Amino acid sequence: MHTWPTRVGAVLQMLDPATGPRLIFDRLWQECLTWKTIGGIWLQVRPGHLTPSGTFQVGEPIPEVEEIAELATAATAPIHTDALPVIARQLRDGNVPIATLLVSHHDAEDAAAFVVDVLSRWCMDRLRLQLEVSELSEENHVLRGSLTPTVRSHEILTVSGMMHSLIASAVRAAASSATVLIQGETGTGKELLARLIQTHSHRAHKPMVSVNAGALSPTLLESELFGHVRGAFTGADHDRKGVFEVANGGTLFLDEVAEIGPEAQVRLLRVLQERCINRVGDHASIPVDVRIIAATHRDLVKEVQAGRFREDLFYRLNVVNLVLPPLRERPEDIPLLVNHFLQQYNRQNYKEVDEIPRQVLEMLCAYPWPGNVRELENCVQKAVVLAPGRVFIEELVPPTIRSYADSVLRDQRGAMPMVVQARKDPQVELQVALERYAEAVAPDIGRFLEQAERILIAWALNRERGIKLRAAKALGINRVTLDRKLVEYDIHVKRGHGIIDLAKGA
């Protein structure tokens, strides 16, 4: 209830047309009798008791105040003998009545109607504001739940050639509105790849909402995805938006899509086909504009063949297919990831574990990591937390990893050092090489940069077999610049063979 200043003496209440309270004012706007309807029966609300007074329907003419005997006797101040018309104004949202405002006044009906009109508009503004606050609160809750604790959620750390190729495909797909299906083992970084796609898309400024279909029961999943109306099922005591509505205009990351039940698969297929949804318990269609990025660790082709996943839905989802390789297929990324996780968990735990012995790195590189990047991250986090000093000692490596690595290293003792050396971070190797160069000769930056430039140009031309346009693209320069450098360094190239004489002009 909102109380106006004493000099006005009016009391205002936002009302439900069926069960809410009605307020009737005396002719001087100084006394207010509060009444409530329960099943259509008007009840006078007074401290300690309720008295039935009469029956009225919404839209039915209301008699003069003094014709209601109970109203006259219940007043806390004398009611004057002249008639007091009661003005009723319905509050509507479009064509839907949501509340009723009742006011009595002794002056001309036009003046009272003006006041009622002003107050009713104020009521509608308050009701709309309350609704918007509720919707924004619900949307904020959903979006907060979609956030991940990753330091750089849209970046994928890798030096692997196959990963760079995959990322390039993902960036190209991001520029379109096509549905993307990401497949890969658990822990390979499917959500990171999804966020990279969203970051490079035209929907980057819109929300990205994540839902793990494998973590919810079929009933809860349908409600989470599509929303529900009041009374749709036990416990549904109010209307609720689903993530499709919350993510409208943005991106929905649907993880473990293979776990969706048959009914939800039908609903999801309709969203992809018609771009509209129905809340659970409602037949009204709600248009949505959402890009779907789905992910699964299962083989969906086998799921379709087994009859557990709809074939038509598979084809709708599988417009762009991206397959994340497991960590065991890109071991060159292990040193880079270990270094990244060391820095991350050092910051979080106020530690300084910044040294990892060669034998420990060999163990980590030899292990196949069935849990992929997630398992490696867990291993490094535990080591940082338990490390007694600045060194990642061998005892911090889990026993299962140590025993497996020992058996592998015994068979490959001669080859492993070379393998580990090849798996080092290229930036680290470059730093080491520069430091050795500076120690070996008096560093002349101009001369060094010239030699480095010649070596990189030679590398690109040899890789592209003398095709200058492709070599220039590999170097990140244009063809004109490359031709000028070739003349400057007197490098001779034959198309199809690469460089004829690199030493010339050195």
Image (cartoon, rainbow, N blue to C red):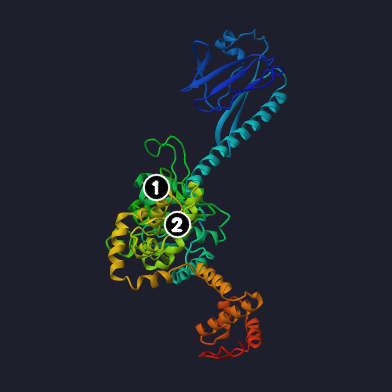
Query: Which of disc 2 and disc 1 is earlier in sequence?
Result: 2
For disc 2, the marked residue is 191
Mark identifier at residue 222: 1
Nearest to viewer (mark 1 / mark 2): 2
Q: State the separation of the CA atoms marked 1 and 2.
A: 21 Å
Residue 374 at what x, y percent from top left?
A: 40, 56
In which quadrant is the C terminus drawn? bottom right
Q: Amino acid at mark 2?
A: Glu
The image shows residue 344, relative to residue 359, as above or below, that is: above
Three-letter residue code for mark 1: Glu
Q: Residues within 10 Å of mark 2 (few under 14, many from 20)?
A: many
* Residue 442 location, quadrant: bottom right
Residue at left offset 51%, top offset 60%: 155
Badge 1 crowding class, 10 Å Cα cut-off, few under 14, some 14 to 19, many 20 or more, is many
Q: Secondary structure at mark 2?
A: helix
Tell which of 453 and 200 is nearer to you: 453
Q: Which mark is residue 111?
A: none
Question: Is 133 left, or right, of 4 in this rendering?
Answer: left
Q: Where does the N terminus fall, quadrant-wise?
A: top right
Nearest the viewer among 62 and 434 is: 434
